[in-house]
Image: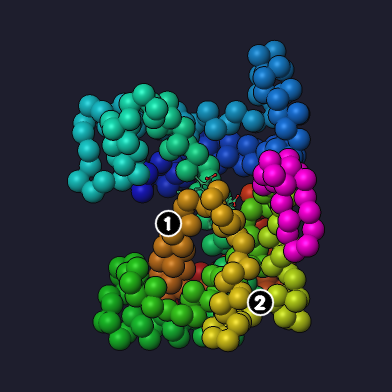
Amino acid sequence: MMTFSKPFGFLEAGNDWNNALHQIRAAGDSAAWVGQNPWLYRLCQQTLFPIFGNPLALSNRNGSVREFAVIQSTVRQTRGAPAQPDIMQKLLHVHDMKPNTFNDDAVRSMVATNIFGGAETTTSSIRAVIYFLLKDTAALTKLQQEIDRVCHEHSWPSDVPVALHLAQSMQYLQAVIYESMRLFPANGLPLARVSPPQGLEIDGHYFPPGVQLTVYSWALHRNKRLFGEDAMEFKPERWLDEEHSRDLHRCFFSFGYGSRSCLGRNLAWMEMLKLVSTFFRKYAVHLHDPRATWVVEGGFIKGQKNINVLLKAR
Ligand code: HEM
């Protein structure tokens, strides 16, 4: 919706429309290992691709999501802009300003990249929030009390999604999302940077030019020196501790860091705030089998299986 002002049609179709989610997952799985070996990528993509096609799903970014982008951009050019500018419109505006450096193809690639980068990551982060809360009923009760209190104080109707400004004011909700994304960073791989031509010194260690350096969020987020002896536990309260929370935020790595950090962070955060608050306001949710544990899978973008829940309107 945010990109095209138009849904893809998953709900109407009642299935994985045009195999799009499957393609995104397959691209993520192969990126997990081919992406760590640039020579293998070059071999598969540049040399073998014309002969064998795309068995490793490396070109899936050119699949249904991109096709949808191509159709939508053509339709947009004939029908004109939507009333509320969406991401596509903003990219087309850049294209109008710089037609040579940001051509039609770049608009479509950018749109497809955002969807590849923003779909499964946000989904599995939300799944993590739901799972951790269902495993910790005290935290869930505390969150629902906060949601109910804030909505009641603002006489917010129960049949409309929770407004962003209300969800933003819910401190415990924010803490729950940070804590879930700390224990479950959606990105499952180290994202390397290359040391500059003059080399680099970090904490007394010298790295020569061209060395790949990385910080792995799954390890960093479980470091007891940074997050305390209870680093392995789900404890949203740690983010509300005024004395330490600034340091914790500095070590929060789920969206990466620096000049290549996630471009969709604010958008994803907004989606999560609205969705989680509205979901738990509306429904009493329980794990179908409270003893069952999830199965974590995937490489580049981690997913989870085996979370079966029972929903009842509250
Ligand atoms: C909870 C959801 C999300 C998570 C956990 C996430 C995580 C990440 C991570 C770890 C990176 C790499 C950062 C680095 O190398 O330092 C990244 C990059 C990126 N993300 Fe996200 N992301 C999320 C949602 C989104 C959304 C919704 C969009 C788009 C609408 C998006 C667009 C991008 C783009 C375009 C990049 C590449 C930035 C660049 O290379 O300059 N992401 N994301």
Using the image as rendered, state which of residue 154 and residue 33 is in the foreground: 33
Q: Residue furthest front?
A: 198
Q: Identify whether 203 is placed above or below 191.
A: below
Q: Residue at x 54, y 62 (%)?
A: 126
Residue 4 lies, in percent from the top left, at 34, 41
Q: Which residues are magenta?
A: 193-211
What amino acid type should be assigned to the residue bearing mark 1? Leu
Residue 258 lies, in percent from the top left, at 56, 54
What mark, if any, has residue 267 been given in the picture?
Answer: 1
Q: How is the image coloured?
A: rainbow
Q: Is mark 2 within 8 Å of ligand 1?
A: no
Secondary structure, mark 2, is: loop
Residue 209 lies, in percent from the top left, at 74, 42
Q: Identify whether 187 is placed above or below 102.
A: below
Q: Identify whether 58 is placed above or below 121.
A: above
Q: Residue at x 42, y 26 (%)?
A: 105
When asked about the image quadrant of residue 69, the answer is: top left
Q: Earlier in the sequence, mark 2 or mark 1?
A: 2
Q: Which residue is mark 2?
A: 234
Using the image as rendered, state which of residue 195 and residue 145 is in the foreground: 195
Rounded to the nearest whole Å, what is the CA distance between mark 2 and mark 1?
24 Å
